[in-house]
Image (cartoon, rainbow, N blue to C red):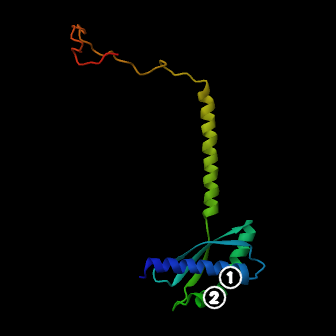
Amino acid sequence: MTDPARARKLADRIQQIVAEMLERRIKDPRLGFVTVTDTRLTNDLRDATVYYTVYGSDAERADSAAALESAKGVIRSEVGKRTGVRHTPSLTFVPDALPENARQIDDLLAKARAADERVAKVAENARPAGDANPYRETPVPRDVDETDGDGGDDAGYSRS
């Protein structure tokens, strides 16, 4: 087990190095518009999972995944040089599901808004099924002789 703060710092550094490598050094034509979104390390700092997104079609995503897999060794050696850790973590590239999840949530929110609008249209001209004021007001019990000349309430009720 290592210190979680150290693991987080190392993961951030690996993410930065991988992003720079993809931007500047990897010249594979299959590599599309790739964004490194997150990096996570195991507790023993031996394995790093790099999450990425690719802007484009499914074919471009598949080509980018193949390009990342073929460049894994070069990227790992650069990570080892620039981090200075005793054991360079092995890299695993995983497509991040965040954009698909966000798109699905947006679709669900749009459906909920449309349903709310339909309910609001139906409710515009709706009338209550019962009385207009469904809350019955119960009369406040008053003393038979409210004013006995002393200026105070006999029953302890305030006058309105």
Q: Amino acid at mark 2?
A: Glu
Pointer 1 with pointer 2, Cβ within 8 A: yes
**Does 105 appear above or below 33?**
above
What residue is drawn where x is 52% and y is 89%? Answer: 85
The quadrant in which residue 158 appears is top left
Q: Quadrant of the C terminus?
A: top left
Residue at the spot of label 1: 21
Residue 111 at x, y percent in the picture:
63, 45
The residue closer to the viewer here, 8 or 148, is 148
Residue at the image position 45 percent from the left and 80 percent from the top: 43
Q: What is the C-alpha distance between the residues marked 1 and 2?
A: 8 Å
Above or below, comparing residue 157 to residue 60 in the picture = above
Q: Considering the numbered disc 1 on the image, is that residue within a helix, a strand or a loop?
A: helix
How packed mark 1 is, by other alpha carbons closer than 10 Å (few <14, some 14-19, many 20 or more), is: some
Q: Nearer the viewer, residue 88 or 104?
A: 88
Give the image location of residue 23, x and y in percent.
Answer: 71, 78
Residue 78: mark = 2
Question: Which residue is found at the position 61% from the left and 29% from the top?
Answer: 122
> 53 above or below 45?
above
Q: Which residue is at the far front? A: 150
On residue 160, the disc is none
| Disc with the residue nearer the chain's start (1 vs 2) | 1
Q: Viewed as shown, does residue 91 lie left or right of 147?
A: right
- Along the viewing direction, whichever of 116 and 156 lies nearer the viewer: 156
Q: As shown in the figure, which amino acid type bears the numbered disc 1?
A: Met
